[in-house]
Amino acid sequence: MKKILLSLSLLVAINIANAQTWDTQATGFSSASRGINDLQITDANTVWGLAYDGTGSATNVQEFTLTTNGGTTWVPGVINVGNAALSIGNLCAINATTAWVSAFDGTAGLGSIWKTSDSGLTWTQQNAGTFSTAASSWIDGVHFFDANNGLAFGDPVGTAFEIYKTSDGGATWTVVTSPAAVLNEYGYAGNFAYAGNTFWFTTSKGKIYRTTDMGATWTKLASPLTDFGAQVTTNNVGNIYFSDNNTGIILGSKNYVAATATTPSSGTYKIYTTTNGGTTWSAGVTYTGFKNLCYIPGTTKIIATSAVTTTTTSDGSSYSTDNGVTWTTIETGVQRLAPAFLNPTTGWCGGFNTDPLTGGVFKFNGDLANAVFGLNNNFTVTPNPANTLVSISSTLVDSYKLKVVDLTGKLIMEKELNGIQNTVDVSSLTSGMYFFTFTSEAKSETIKIIKN
């Protein structure tokens, strides 16, 4: 069976403005509309980004970009696996020099693992000869817990998933026995999660395979879904996310309709939670927010970014401090791709570049521990909290627009201001939290305001 790499929606580059909550950085790719669909943060300065074609033409891309100075500069590179037709399933990095990728044929599957030890200048195949059983093998991912211990997994060969582990950085690999698979059960490239020494991957039968000892032993768990990739049960799709060994969520839909070239995917989504590593799951709560999610590791804070699209009206980002129960809007009307966070103040999300010097990735500018956004403020609003009038000051001399939205994202007010100083009457607003978004040419900034 041909297995398709699914995401929760169609991600195509749209020409949009930047918001100050996320500072624009340049990925350096020579081709325009290179998107970033996977970010690997190894420390506050080192981030790897895996690229894909955002033009909508489905061109296969074997490229990455790397920063070692917190995003001040990004250096792009080619993932040379010796065959330009292979799709890169995922990238796993542990430091500024060392990373691995999985790669497979989009029709035949099969595949292998490649490692770089020189920041992506060269790539060397590992575990050659595996994932090579015709009509069965299909590598779904590679993950390393540290410089030595890693695993690679793929579709069942016979009655068990094809899984290997290594304890010497990939020099040698050992086959691992997994719980039995059933007919038409297979994995999905990139649909997995990890935290500490624990790793989870999902299947077309709605199951979750979990290891808590870096791949040595595995347990097969049930989930609320009957399929995680809409290939066997075509209206079921979902992704898993974990913050630690126990705390995790599934974002899934049981009435999923796949995206087309002109329309985003649709369906009623729910968030299902677990506090025991996926052994049991909650009944699920309806979720209408942005579809790209990530945890701040070790917390119940989740960041969500947009995954639309044909318009920018439903784009933006938001966050939850209570494991997805309630959500606070950070911004609206700005397209974002997959996020990744190291801690509450250090995170990036993907974007699309215009040229080598313009765009492609965004660095978070705020503090999610204290719900502060846009630390490098061009605007100030006083007093805050406010009762009747607020004064807005700006370091910008040109005019700018103000949009005021409430916690649900509803537009409350829109004004054109002169860029020097202005007074806005907020007395008619009900008590609560609001977001003032200021936009001037290509710059934008969002400030949280409390109305007493």
Image (cartoon, rainbow, N blue to C red):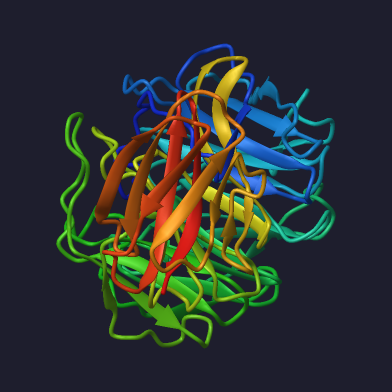
In the figure, is residue 92 to the left or right of 90?
A: right
238 in relation to 100, above or below = below
Q: Where is residue 45 in the image (x, y as percent from the top left)?
A: 80, 43
327 in relation to 93, above or below = below
Give the camera-side residue of 116 and 411.
Answer: 411
Residue name at image x 34 percent, y 51 percent: 404
Please identify the quarter of the rendering in which residue 264 is found.
top left
Give the camera-side residue of 158 and 94.
Answer: 94
User: Residue 419: in sight, yes or no?
Assistant: yes
Q: In which quarter of the image is the N terminus?
A: top left
Q: Where is residue 27 in the image (x, y as percent from the top left)?
A: 62, 25
Residue name at image x 62 percent, y 78 percent: 245
Q: In which quarter of the image is the C terminus?
A: bottom left
204 in relation to 421, above or below = below
Q: Where is residue 39 in the image (x, y as percent from the top left)?
A: 60, 44
Q: Where is residue 189 in the image (x, y as percent from the top left)?
A: 45, 48
Give the camera-side residue of 44 and 158.
Answer: 44
User: Residue 88: in sight, yes or no?
Assistant: no
Residue name at image x 29 percent, y 36 percent: 312
395 in relation to 231, above or below = above
